[in-house]
Amino acid sequence: MIYLAVFIGSLVFTGLVRMYAIRKSIVDIPNDRSSHSIPTPRGGGLAIAIVWFGGLIFYFVQNNMDSSLFYALLAGLPLSFIGFADDVFNLKPGVRFLIQFICAGLALWFLVGLQNIPIATINFQLWYLLTPLAFIAIIWAINLFNFLDGIDGYIGLEIVFIGFAIYVLTGDQLGMLLALSTLGFLIWNWPKAKIFMGDVGSTLLGFTVAVLAIYHQNKEVSSIWVWLILTAVFWFDATITLLRRIKNKEKLSEAHRKHAYQRIVQSGFSHQKTTLLALALNLIGFIFALLALTYSSFALLFLLGDLVLLFFVLNYIDKRKPFEYCVKAL
């Protein structure tokens, strides 16, 4: 019943947020990094945040989750507040980064850092080195999910996939909660989107996925490599694009549409076709993740196999729409 309530809540609250955004003129105006051409209400991620945190509190009160994980995930609440404020008022980057640092630090405090990481048959327990890396990873996850919230349905379907995949692979009920919290929103956001997620949703989801990955690794439920495989479509695109822009000496603060998913849309793919292509890649990644979970000693090899697949897909996109000749605006 909680799953049904979460889905219906996400669906209904998204509709209410949309009505509020239209009434208050909280809309996304197309700019240089946009893949849409008409103003669209934004802030729909607020609905995700409401049902997600509501579900967390319900599980915690029912003693169905670890208190350390509950407080670590609850540390993402300020991200939602500042994200919604940014959707409404367009805050300065410094304010957003300050809140991100605080939330990441709090989460790692409650999780007692990143305790270990497996490589082949060796489990390295170097928390004093791994925890700073985990801090950077959380900040990167927060921002890369924000970067990749650029076409209809893309980030929503990615989160639904990750949530369901984790539930199937590990039985973690929070995976189902995460998926259903997003699924109701996704119905409104499916091409052509009636509302966008906004920073209130994308930053929270990036934070949540990173925290769950660290917790699973600490508890040895599933290794960090499994999570890297399940999220590879996102971080591979964002990381390669960033490295290319650095190589080209581009101004990193400048808006752009050079991510692979944006370029394939420019080449002629619809938002729906691009999103379904990402889902197909995710489903293949799920097989790699299952193998990495089952044969943990070879997890890095399965991650490498998934990255090889993504490299060939990137090469295909490069041929359709070369990175260097990518336009900024519609």
Image: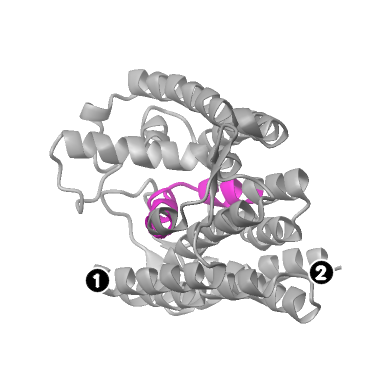
Magenta stretch, residue numbers: 134-160
Q: Residue at x 71, y 59 (%)?
A: 180
What predominant SS class does the magenta segment belong to?
Answer: helix
The N terminus lies in quadrant: bottom right
Marker disc for residue 9: none
Crowdedness near tag 1: few (<14), some (14–19) or many (≥20) residues, C-alpha within 10 Å = few
Amino acid at dot 1? Gly
Q: Does residue 192 appear in this view?
A: no
Q: Residue at x 15, y 47 (%)?
A: 251
Amino acid at dot 2? Ile
The C terminus lies in quadrant: top left
The residue tagged 1 is: 94
Query: Helix or strand or loop: what does disc 2 sit on?
Result: helix
- Which image quadrant is residue 299 in? top right
Q: Position of residue 68 (x, y in %)?
A: 62, 72
Query: Helix or strand or loop: what does disc 1 sit on?
Result: helix
